[in-house]
Image (cartoon, helix red, strand yellow):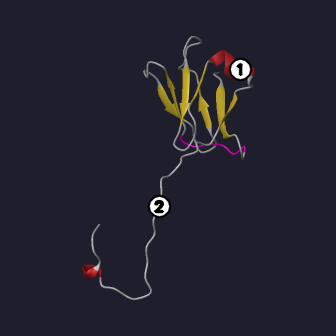
Amino acid sequence: MGQNLVVIDSLTNKPIAFASITNQLRTISISTNFEGLVNLDNFNRKDTIIISTINYDIKRTTLDQLKKQHWKISLKPAIYKLGTVVISANRWQQKTQDVPFR
């Protein structure tokens, strides 16, 4: 029986569903389930394991490092900076065809 890894959010400690787990060569690719669990049987001890998902920083690790962490890894939410956002509105009703395109 293999080893299961749980992937959690570093701020909330809640499981992260559908996180992608791949090796560096991208010959193995699996995803976590709804509970943030994934079985790592297909990975070799020498593999660099890449854990990624949208809105989180990517982590690179090995099976030995994961074992030391008791098969639990936390991902840090990524911070994205937006440029200037302009919202324009008026108090009068206007037909769609009368709105200028910019």
Cα distance in 3D space between marks 2 and 1: 45 Å
In the image, what residue type sits under mark 2?
Answer: Val
**Majority secondary structure of magenta residues:** loop
Instruction: Please report the residue visible at 42 percent of the width from the left and 21 percent of the height from the top.
Output: 27
In the image, what residue type sits under mark 1?
Answer: Lys
Instruction: Please report the residue visible at 47 percent of the width from the left and 28 percent of the height from the top.
Output: 29
Instruction: Please report the residue visible at 66 percent of the width from the left and 43 percent of the height from the top.
Output: 15
In the displayed image of the protein, which residue is found farthest to the bottom? 92
> Which residue in the structure is indicated by mark 1?
67
Residue density around tag 1, few if under 14, some if 14–19, many if 20 or more, within 10 Å: few
Q: Is residue 16 magenta?
A: yes
Frontmost residue, 67 versus 85: 85
Frontmost residue, 63 versus 87: 87
Q: Is residue 14 left or right of residue 30?
A: right
Q: Is residue 40 magenta?
A: no
Mark toward the start of the polypeptide (2 vs 1): 1
Q: Is residue 68 left or right of residue 96?
A: right
Residue density around tag 2, few if under 14, some if 14–19, many if 20 or more, within 10 Å: few
Instruction: Please report the residue visible at 55 percent of the width from the left and 14 percent of the height from the top.
Output: 44
Where is residue 56 shown, x and y percent of the image?
Answer: 57, 40
Compared with residue 100, is residue 27 higher up or lower down, i.e. above or below?
above
Compared with residue 6, is residue 68 higher up or lower down, i.e. above or below?
above
Where is residue 24 shown, x and y percent of the image?
Answer: 48, 19
In the displayed image of the protein, which residue is found farthest to the top? 46
Residue 85, numbered circle: 2
- SS category of the residue bearing label 2: loop
Q: Is residue 58 left or right of residue 7?
A: left
Q: Give the magenta range.
A: 13-18
**Of the residues tagged 2 and 1, which is closer to the observer?**
2
